[in-house]
Amino acid sequence: RYTLEGHAKAISSVKFASSAASCLLASGSADKTLRLWDAESGRWKATLDKHQQGISDVAWSHDDRMLCSASDDRSLFVWDAEQTKTLLHLTGHVNYVFCTAFSPFSNLVASGSYDESVRLWDVRTGRTIRVLPAHSEPVSSVTFSSDGTL
């Protein structure tokens, strides 16, 4: 119904907020930006632009209060979706970060990278709590089960 225009380069990830009340859509792009849109009206709401290279993936927290963006700059940002401000800058991967996901309780973020590792991050502190390096290829997807396990 709408064409959402605004990114200067290819869009790599589009995710709807899970809450029907919020009607928000997040899009991440090779243009280094994360954009928030009102999905009902198609109107642009905000541009989040802290990454130094393109964004590969975006994920909403389960309460839709936070967003996480994964980037080719080897980092992730956790954002306050309502205030559109940076909460955390997560660094530690040594190659592109390709994917990200929040745990069901939104207290952890998982990230997968071309460095062949999965990292688990504590959202309260911004620290890596575990690195799972036992992959022989880049990690292209991460998710948690409904009980919070990977």
Image (cartoon, helix red, strand yellow):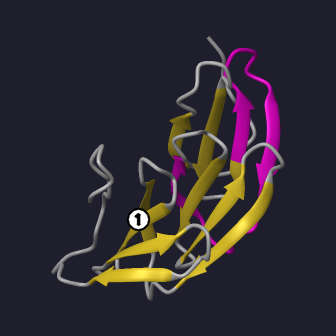
Q: Residue at x 67, y 44 (%)?
A: 65
Q: Position of residue 48 (x, y in %)?
A: 76, 55
**Is any part of residue 69 visible from this angle?**
yes
Report the side of 102 relative to 68 (left or right).
left
Quadrant where the C terminus lies?
bottom left
Q: From this view, report whether residue 20 is shown above or below residue 24.
A: above
Q: Residue at x 48, y 73 (%)?
A: 121
* Residue lying farthest to the top in this orientation: 1
Q: Residue at x 66, y 19 (%)?
A: 21
Mark 1 nearby-residue class (10 Å; few <14, some 14–19, many ≥20) = many
Please give the residue where the numbered disc 1 appears in the rendered image.
110
Question: Magenta part of the protein: which range?
Answer: 35-60
Q: Position of residue 133 (x, y in %)?
A: 25, 84
Q: Is residue 36 magenta?
A: yes
Q: Inspect the image, locate mark 1, and give the three-letter code of the amino acid beneath it.
A: Ala
Q: Position of residue 106 (x, y in %)?
A: 51, 53
Quadrant in which residue 51 is drawn: bottom right
Q: Position of residue 109 (x, y in %)?
A: 47, 63
Quadrant where the N terminus lies?
top right
Quadrant in which residue 103 is drawn: bottom left
Marker count (numbered): 1
Q: From this view, report whether residue 61 is shown above or below residue 73.
A: above
Quadrant in which residue 49 is drawn: bottom right
**Is any part of residue 7 visible from this angle?**
no
Q: Is residue 44 magenta?
A: yes
